[in-house]
């Protein structure tokens, strides 16, 4: 904006410069021939500057204006033929300098614009190449991580299964009121938790491609609500379902999308340990299907807001921080997007958008 205002003021400064030079020229006695010569040559400054700033048109306009303003002075000395011829030649030179400088400045400007455009295109090509290289490196790291994860998970799951099975076998021989019964329950619970952790890690490291099939959104929402209803009852969380009708069938992987929604719902329930309201809604928003999960908890922690969907980011004391990262990846694989914001009346809102048409 500032550069635009400065450019708009340039013609006025040029005009003022020509007027000042003319004033000095007209008000200097002819006895001071050297000053007259100097002031006359000063006209070239606004002419060259106008040509450089505005090209051929600017140079010629400044030259013509300088000539018109200078003509009355020439009329005063028309009786001196040699002087008049010299001044006419000077005015012709005004036009030549304005035109030549304008042409050269225009050519230089076009050349500079061409170089700048080339630089922009090269930078864009470099950025695209760098992004492609980064994606390839990331894909390679993920592939290596996936292979390593599969081996680790296999090695961990075998002893976990043995620990869990042994605890169940011992549990059948220990009366519930026995002091050791509580320790067996802890062993089983922690083995199940650890099994869930390694499962999350494997899902993140080696995600499978979605199998897209026409699916009714209501079926997914209702199925997930049934799975989460028991945990919601235990924490006194009321679940409300709001599915707009009619909704078209959507091409998606039903199991993966159930996993995403279930993860979001369980997170929302955990955010309301004292109870609250959980709303799961589905509806059409333009060209997208919107799946939203709203809760009345404490909202999103500002310290993790920007990296909420990054792996290993969590505010829980018992968690891997992979749940939302997995959800983000699955939604992205469906060509959609996921966003988490603070709710209008407190709590948090997580909105999933999936394309209705592919």
Image (cartoon, rainbow, N blue to C red):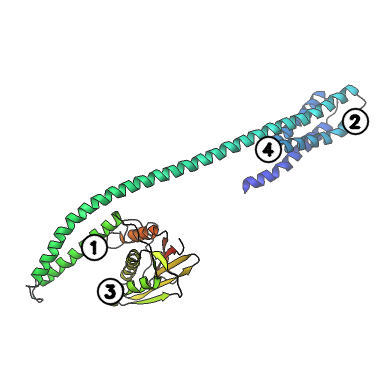
Q: Position of residue 353 (x, y in %)?
A: 43, 64
* Quarter of the image with the C terminus in it: bottom left
Q: Position of residue 198 (x, y in %)?
A: 23, 58
Marks 4 and 1, how far apart in space?
A: 70 Å
Q: Pick out the residue farthest to the right.
A: 79
Q: Kindly indicate whether the residue at mark 1 contacts the one at mark 4 (C-beta within 8 angstroms).
A: no
Which mark lies nearer to you, 2 or 1?
A: 1
Q: Helix, strand or loop at disc 2?
A: helix
Q: Nearer the viewer, residue 342 or 205?
A: 205
Q: Position of residue 349 (x, y in %)?
A: 41, 67
Q: Which residue is mark 1?
A: 196
Lower position in the chain sequence, tag 2 or tag 1: 2
Q: Kindly indicate whether the residue at mark 4 contacts the one at mark 2 (C-beta within 8 angstroms).
A: no
One can see residue 39 in this view:
no
Marks 1 and 3, how far apart in space?
A: 17 Å
Lower position in the chain sequence, tag 2 or tag 3: 2
- In the displayed structure, 214 sits above or below 230; it is above
Lower position in the chain sequence, tag 2 or tag 4: 4
Give residue 231's mark: 3
Residue at point 11%, 67% (across, down): 167
Q: Which residue is mark 2?
A: 76
Marks 2 and 1, how far apart in space?
A: 102 Å
């Amino acid at each position: 904006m500032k550069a635009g205002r400065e450019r708009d003021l340039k013609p006025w400064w040029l005009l003022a410069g020509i007027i000042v030079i003319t004033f000095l020229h007209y008000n200097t006695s002819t006895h001071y021939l050297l000053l007259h010569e100097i002031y006359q040559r000063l006209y070239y400054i606004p002419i060259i500057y106008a040509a450089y700033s505005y090209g051929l048109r600017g140079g010629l306009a400044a030259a013509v204006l300088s000539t018109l303003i200078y003509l009355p002075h020439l009329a005063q000395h028309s009786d001196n033929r040699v002087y008049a011829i010299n001044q006419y030649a000077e005015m012709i030179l005004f036009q030549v300098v304005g035109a030549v400088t304008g042409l050269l400045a225009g050519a230089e400007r076009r050349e500079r614009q061409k170089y700048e455009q080339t630089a922009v295109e090269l930078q864009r090509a470099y950025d695209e190449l760098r992004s492609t290289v980064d994606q390839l490196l990331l894909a390679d790291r993920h592939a290596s991580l996936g292979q390593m994860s599969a081996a680790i998970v296999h090695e961990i799951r075998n002893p976990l299964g043995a620990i869990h099975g042994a605890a169940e076998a011992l549990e059948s021989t220990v009366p519930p009121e026995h002091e050791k019964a509580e320790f067996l329950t802890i062993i089983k619970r922690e083995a199940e938790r650890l099994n869930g952790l390694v499962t999350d890690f494997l899902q993140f490291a080696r995600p499978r491609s979605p199998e897209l099939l026409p699916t009714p959104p209501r079926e997914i929402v209702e199925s997930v609500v049934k799975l989460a209803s028991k945990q919601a009852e235990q924490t006194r969380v009321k679940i409300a379902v709001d599915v707009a009708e009619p909704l078209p069938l959507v091409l998606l992987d039903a199991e993966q999308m159930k996993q995403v929604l279930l993860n979001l719902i369980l997170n929302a329930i955990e955010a309301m340990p004292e109870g609250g309201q959980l709303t799961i809604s589905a509806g059409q928003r333009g060209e997208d299907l919107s799946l939203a999960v709203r809760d009345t908890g404490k909202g999103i922690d500002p310290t993790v807001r920007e990296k909420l969907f990054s792996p290993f980011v969590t505010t829980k004391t018992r968690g891997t921080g992979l749940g939302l990262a997995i959800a983000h990846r699955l939604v992205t694989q469906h060509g959609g997007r996921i966003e988490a914001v603070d709710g209008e009346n407190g709590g948090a809102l997580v909105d999933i958008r999936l394309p209705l048409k592919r």
